[in-house]
Image (cartoon, rainbow, N blue to C red):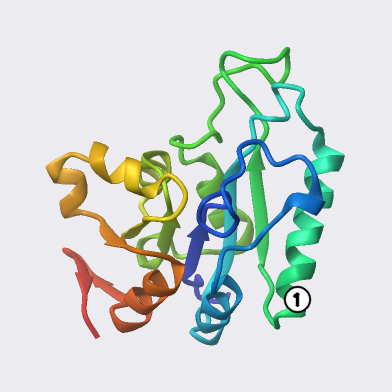
Amino acid sequence: MAAPQRAVFLDRDGTLLDETGYLADPGELKLLDGIAAALRRLRQGSFFLCVVTNQSGIARGLFDEADLDRIHRRMQEKLAAAGVSLDAILHCPHHPDHGSQPLRKRCLCRKPAPGMLLEAASRFGLDLPNSWSIGDSGRDLEASRRAGVSGRILVLTGKGKATLKELSAAELEATHVVPNLATAVETILTADTFDGEGLRST
């Protein structure tokens, strides 16, 4: 049996893509500057690249699964043109207060719940304690913590600057705060192993 693989879990909007609210049109999709180059560096480091994204726009009726699939295919096409790809994209379509059944519910996959990360680990054989997550919100950080991901990074793109102001002292202590994805990748590649007490520099 193959050993579990280290992963980097990536939020989508505000981390990889320009934050536009509820993105429903593939033509409006825009990668943030430097994203493809940063992902190529992670790929060279043999990380499994997995996007985990809340997409309550489906529950809200703003777009449907087919629309979301077109958006994600467009994102993959843009990345492929720049020489990189994502290994998996998982999304949560639910919302606890909007839409109708079965989309209106308190699920286990909507971040800050850890369900998408746990599902990815189960499906793809991922090593959560030796993995990283990158996102721009407190929900990203909390989902990763609850899933047992040891390396947690807040980027100051998207909602990141507002999120930073809301973090407690304990959360700040457990979080790497960086300007953007490129700097997050540098953090990972220069300190990417863990011991029983947490991060250990290489």
Q: Position of residue 157 (x, y in %)?
A: 43, 55
Q: Closest to the observer: 121 or 84?
A: 84
Residue for point 75% across, 76% down: 80
Q: Position of residue 120 (x, y in %)?
A: 58, 54
Residue for point 64% across, 27% down: 94
**Left or right of residue 188: residue 91:** right
Q: Up-down: is 49 above or below 9?
A: below
The total of numbered circles placed on residues is 1
Query: Looking at the figure, which quarter contains the C terminus?
Result: bottom left
Residue on which disc 1 sits: 80
Residue for point 56% across, 71% down: 35
Badge 1: few (under 14), some or many (20 or more) residues near its Cα, within 10 Å? few
- The secondary element bearing badge 1 is classed as helix
Q: Position of residue 56 (x, y in %)?
A: 64, 30
Disc 1 residue type?
A: Ala
Query: Looking at the figure, which quarter contains the N terminus?
Result: bottom right
Q: In which quadrant of the rendered view does residue 179 lie? A: bottom left
Question: Which residue is most to the left?
Answer: 169
Q: Position of residue 167 (x, y in %)?
A: 23, 40
Q: Up-down: is 184 above or below 88?
A: below
**Left or right of residue 49: residue 149:** left
Q: Closest to the observer: 64 or 125?
A: 64
Q: Up-down: is 49 above or below 20?
A: below
